[in-house]
Image (tube, rainbow, N blue to C red):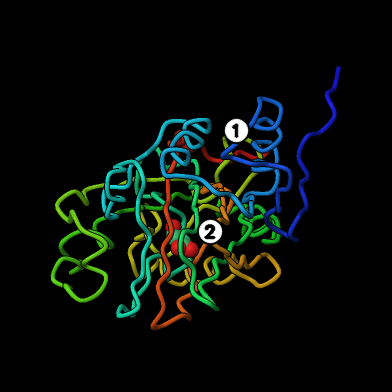
């Protein structure tokens, strides 16, 4: 017997869907959670509004998605070590997540996704943009796809969060929010085109924050092809721009999307809480 659907899923265009009919503080029954997870798999990112949750409820909700993968470099929320604080104070100029990326791709087993919850938002600006990495793959030529199926890329955390990133010397700005440089030792090789572990669909899997080069290629050889793929992946028609309100939540799939945080709210506070969920090892997409 098929149960009637219990939540509303309203697609937001090429990527994402707005969810209605869910109150996380009140709790979700199994049917609602199954539908939410299906919407996440289908649309790559889901958005919820007007959620009024405590940090403990955020953690409890995250546990339904899987094990929590604690970010090594973000400052944790006071008293809640499983939640990373994504903050920009009025006197700070740089924001976290300012370039298109996917979270934790430097891990050998990259995170499934992240659950970002808005606590304080600026009066205007501070949106997050998402792009659809299935569409990015599907719209490449057959010749390019054939080439990419054979390639992997080297990802690393070292240049972004390690001592070379000079984060800890920066006491005014980003260094007060990111740290733990000695823990930035992660290197990983992932296929350039993955078979998505949940949907089975091919997705492009490169991002300019954490990819160093194509595996077995020099930096110089890699740079033009990677630059072309990065530009292609974020074509406007693959994107959706989400405007936050206090109590909004976005749950994104790190294997199906990239995201970037707009930094257009200087002089204002923006405070978000993020929990990242463990994923699974990524396999290459092998065409039939
Ligand atoms: C992130 O990159 O995880 C944060 C995105 C945001 O603050 O909008």
Report the quarter where the N terminus lies: top right
Q: Nearer the viewer, residue 137 or 20?
A: 20
Quarter of the image where one finds residue 110: top left
Report the quarter where the C terminus lies: top right
Q: Are marks 2 and 1 in contact (CB under 8 Å)?
A: no
Examine the rendering and report whether any part of residue 207 can be seen. Answer: no
- Find numbered disc 1 in the image and state the secondary structure of the residue it sits on: loop
> Can you tell which mark lies on residue 258?
2
Measured in 3D between alpha carbons, the distance from the residue under mark 2 to the one under mark 1, in whole angstroms, is: 29 Å
Q: Is residue 32 left or right of residue 282?
A: right
Residue 235 drawn above or below residue 199: below
Tell me residue 7's x, y (percent): 76, 39
Q: Which residue is mark 1?
A: 27
Quarter of the image where one finds residue 179: bottom left
Q: Is residue 150 left or right of residue 81?
A: right
Mark 2: give few (<14), some (14-19) or many (20+) Cα within 10 Å: many
Q: Nearer the viewer, residue 9 or 139?
A: 9
User: Which numbered mark, 2 or 1, is in the foreground of this view?
Assistant: 1
């Amino acid at each position: 017997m098929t149960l009637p659907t219990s939540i509303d899923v309203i697609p937001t265009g090429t990527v994402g869907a707005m969810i209605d009919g869910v109150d996380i503080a009140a709790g979700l029954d199994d049917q609602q959670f199954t539908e939410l997870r299906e919407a996440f798999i289908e649309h790559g990112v889901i958005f919820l509004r007007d959620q009024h949750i405590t940090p403990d409820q955020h953690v409890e909700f995250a546990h339904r998605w899987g094990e929590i993968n604690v970010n090594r470099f973000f400052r944790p929320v006071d008293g809640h070590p499983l939640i990373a604080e994504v903050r920009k104070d009025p006197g700070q100029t740089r924001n976290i997540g300012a370039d298109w990326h996917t979270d934790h791709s430097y891990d050998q087993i990259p995170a499934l996704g992240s659950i970002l919850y808005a606590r304080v938002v600026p009066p205007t600006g501070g949106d997050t943009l998402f792009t659809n990495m299935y569409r990015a793959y599907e719209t490449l030529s057959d010749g390019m796809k054939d080439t990419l199926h054979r390639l992997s890329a080297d990802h690393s955390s070292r240049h972004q969060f390690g001592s070379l990133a000079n984060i800890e010397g920066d006491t005014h700005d980003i260094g007060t929010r990111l740290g733990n440089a000695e823990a930035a030792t992660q290197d990983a090789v992932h296929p350039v085109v993955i078979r998505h572990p949940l949907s089975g669909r091919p997705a492009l899997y490169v991002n300019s924050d954490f990819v160093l080069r194509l595996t077995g290629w020099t930096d110089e050889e890699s740079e033009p092809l990677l630059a072309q793929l990065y530009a292609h992946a974020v074509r406007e028609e693959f994107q959706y721009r989400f405007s936050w309100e206090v109590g909004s939540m976005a749950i994104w799939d790190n294997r199906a999307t990239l995201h970037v945080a707009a930094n257009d709210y200087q002089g204002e506070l923006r405070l978000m809480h993020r929990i990242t969920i463990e994923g699974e090892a990524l396999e290459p997409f092998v065409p039939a």
